[in-house]
Amino acid sequence: MSKLSLALFCSAILACVMVPSASAIPPFARQYGTSCSTCHIDFPKLNDFGKAFKDAGFKFPKDDEDFIKVPPVMLGAAAQKEQWPMKSIYPGTIPGMPPIGVRYATFFQVVSRNRNNFTAPGEVGIPRTDFQNGTLSLFMAGNFGSDIAYWIDDDIAAGGSAADGGMGDAYLKFVDIGRFLKLPKDALSLRMGQFELDLPFSQARSWNLSGWDIFGQPNVGTSADFVNNGFTMDSAAQGIEFSGGHTYRGYHYSLAIVNQNTSGTTTGATNVGPGGDAFSSDSNIKDLYGRFSYRFNLEKDAASRNEIQAAGATGPHDHTYLDVGAFGFYGRSVQRIDTFTAREPFYRVGGNASFNYRNFNLFGVYMYGRDRNQIFTGDGFTAAPSVHFGGGFVEADYLALPWMMAIMRWDNVNSASDRLNGVDGAGFVSPFRSTRQRITPGVQFLIHANIKAAFEYQIRPQQVVTDPETGDIITGPFRTNSAVAGLDFVF
């Protein structure tokens, strides 16, 4: 790897500051005449009531009609229900006002002074300070009646003026269809369209300024391997998902069948592997994702354990709970060379836990990924040692005041072929080799319920670059620590 390439990869690390997709929904505040803090601890982080609202298909879990301040428009008379299905269309509803919201975020970043010690004189390095245009997002969500929910969000611009973003989630969710099969309440729901996988903690709706590294980790082999899988757990999925239970109490499960997307971008795109060989996504192949979790409610008061929120001496607060779970993804990546095609199975498995005590939340994830590695011999493919990685994160959030949350994170990714560390077997490598890690303290302030200021400091190990053949150090030590401040608002 050249020094310039290394600089680009280090820049990519610094560019991990991500604008979460829109998820604090002002249209709901307008529809119900309530504050964003009804559903959010520190938007877009959901409290128990927000989780219950989402599980119910963007409706109040109980007596929804009594709380709506802007009544929906009926698409037909209520009497049509009696005449359905032979003599009428079943009536539904649309929101009484257009359920449109807008979100914008912008950032300022400062990086370590010695960040460019690996660059030669005259080479373009990482800027010391940088104002970064964030993402402008448009989003809509609501319920069409009959427990049919919808969500659409689109990043109109990302990273600057006239810079295209892309479609985020766009789906219909049919809530509690299990009632037609005489199943227990909320035992089965169905979601169709494009959506984020049901991760234990949403990357698309993260409240942090930067995403959790493990969810954004692809699996890319060395130059001697034939693994170039751009799939990441935070990739948008297109398909169908069955789910049930609740995210705020008891059990929760989901099973998704989705199009293959190993390009890391749009399904059907192509990556270029070693020697210019093609690695592409194939929508003829369907991948599987599953998750199961169980939340143990640890509230002492028996009455409050069955409510969505428990009341304490200082007012409403989330339950004390322990939530544990596991998740897994199975897919196949496509590799085409000349007239030969190989489909390499891969999987990602992980576990998660979250403990909450009043205003303190401690949670984390560990995930392991493995790709079968098939080497092209000229006459076909033969098996070689698999390419794997592992890692995760631990985060502690403390709501010190209703409008201020302190955060401490540790991210770790261990990947022997992680190109972001310069370890691709093609030139220069980092002495830290397979491990990429950072410690990220931060603090966030709600200026208003819909305006947030945030700060985080990303601390990374000091590095040097060595010649892999001689072991000689060929650069001075450098860091890519960065301080990031952001301003985020929705309306």
Image (cartoon, helix red, strand yellow):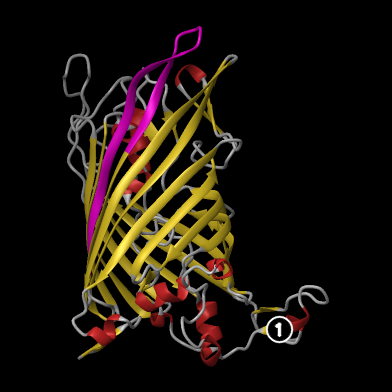
Q: Where is residue 33 in the image (x, y as percent from the top left)?
A: 51, 89
Which residue is at the front of the view, 214 or 321? Answer: 321
Q: Which quadrant holds residue 210?
A: bottom left
Q: In this view, does 36 lie above or below 194?
A: below
Q: Where is residue 147 in the image (x, y as percent from the top left)?
A: 58, 74
Quarter of the picture holding the N terminus? top left
Q: Which quadrant holds residue 306?
A: bottom left
Left or right position of 281 against 442: right
Predominant secondary structure, magenta span: strand
The answer to whether residue 316 of the structure is visible from this angle is no
Q: Position of residue 277 (x, y in %)?
A: 51, 20
- Residue drawn at the location 56% of the way across and 91% of the way down: 69
Which residue is at the front of the view, 128 or 444? Answer: 444
Left or right position of 424 against 99: left
Q: Which quadrant holds residue 9?
A: top left
Label 1 sits on a secondary structure element that is: strand
The answer to whether residue 67 of the structure is visible from this angle is yes
Is 109 inside the magenta-drawn segment? no
- Residue drawn at the location 58% of the way across and 59% of the way down: 170
Q: Is residue 129 above or below residue 177?
A: above
Q: How many marks?
A: 1
Q: Give the range drawn in magenta.
A: 369-397
Q: Position of residue 422 (x, y in %)?
A: 30, 30
Tag 1: amino acid:
Met
- Residue drawn at the location 53% of the way across and 66% of the way down: 178
Is 391 inside the magenta-drawn segment? yes
Tell me the residue that label 1 is attached to: 74
Which residue is at the front of the view, 271 or 163? Answer: 271
> Is disc 1 surrounded by few (<14), some (14 to 19) or many (20+) residues within 10 Å?
some
Residue furthest to the front: 182
